[in-house]
Amino acid sequence: MTKLNVAICQAAPVPLAISDGIDKAVRLAREAVEGGAQLVAFGETFLGGYPLWLDEAPGAALWDHPGSKALHRILLEQAVVPGDERLLPLQELCDASGAVISIGAHERVRSSLYNNQMTFRPGLPVLDHRKLVPTHGERLVWMRGDGSTLGVHQAEWGNVGSLICWEHWMPLARAAMHNLGESLHVAAWPTVRESYAIASRHYAMEGRCFVLAAGLVQTKDDVLNGLERAGGSAEGRELIESIEAEVLNRGGSLIAAPDASVVAQAGEGEETLFAELDLSMRDEGLASLDTDGHYSRPDVFELSVDTRAKDGVRWI
């Protein structure tokens, strides 16, 4: 198979109200699959929405802030958990269509949250990727993932993996993923501003793979409406209402080819971006650049990746 149809669902999440967000994701993914997409990508934490108050609300990072605590409680209550039955419709869509779906979510493990870019694949368990390093203020919400969730799905048309946001500026994470031989890569972002587009196109060139840089569309009203759907909180509403900007994430999703050219790009607002990709471009590009092969120096540089799951307590 040298041709592959792909889609990015650039859409507004239902912030905080994750069950409602799953319903929207299933509808959008089904429409993309019906439009011919064999790989469908959503942006960072589409399920639950990006926690914009961390960047935009004055005082959100203050110790013991009542609004931040209220929103964190709601995220814990709403977050998906391993084996969450609410996600079954996404798995069933993959099983029925043969498509692969990559989507971001807030995931709860015991009492903490991860930023997880989940890959649903037909007939197989969900492939998780938990963000290795939450960026700056994100550390107030998410804990760090470990090497056990660095991986790819091996489809008949090639390997597909994902990284989240600023992980694309972690050179060793990129090197590890390039070693796994991605034909396609999902770069999950909250929005695809200029520097994020540059990082995505650089990844495509460096890894000689197609990159689906998937962003969200998100407004202050989206967050307020999602808060009400999730049960509401006076303290949380007050914090969100203190945000001055109205439009917070604008989209800008794009699909980059292995030569870093832009195959397709979305504008601002909700839309599903489709493209037909010629996968033979990957092998042609490898003639001049294979950063994990003939353009590497393993005799000089060596990377060790620890893929063991890490936990603070081991019961023996």
Image (spheres, rainbow, N blue to C red):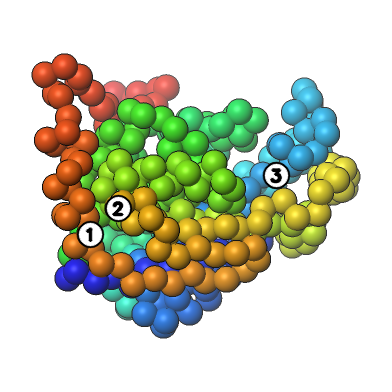
Residue at the bottom extreme of this rendering: 34
Q: Nearer the viewer, residue 48 or 274?
A: 274
Label 2: element kind:
loop
In front of the other: label 1 or label 3? 1
Q: Which mark is residue 258?
A: 2
> With respect to residue 101, does 249 lie above or below?
above
Of mark 3 and mark 2, the one earlier in the sequence is 3
Q: Which mark is residue 52?
A: 3
Q: Residues within 10 Å of mark 2 (few under 14, many from 20)?
A: many
Q: Quadrant of residue 102?
A: bottom left
Residue type, mark 1 in image: Met
Residue type, mark 3 in image: Leu
Q: Is residue 281 visible?
A: yes
Q: Quadrant of the N terminus?
A: bottom left
> With respect to residue 197, does 84 lie above or below?
below
Q: Quadrant of the C terminus?
A: top left
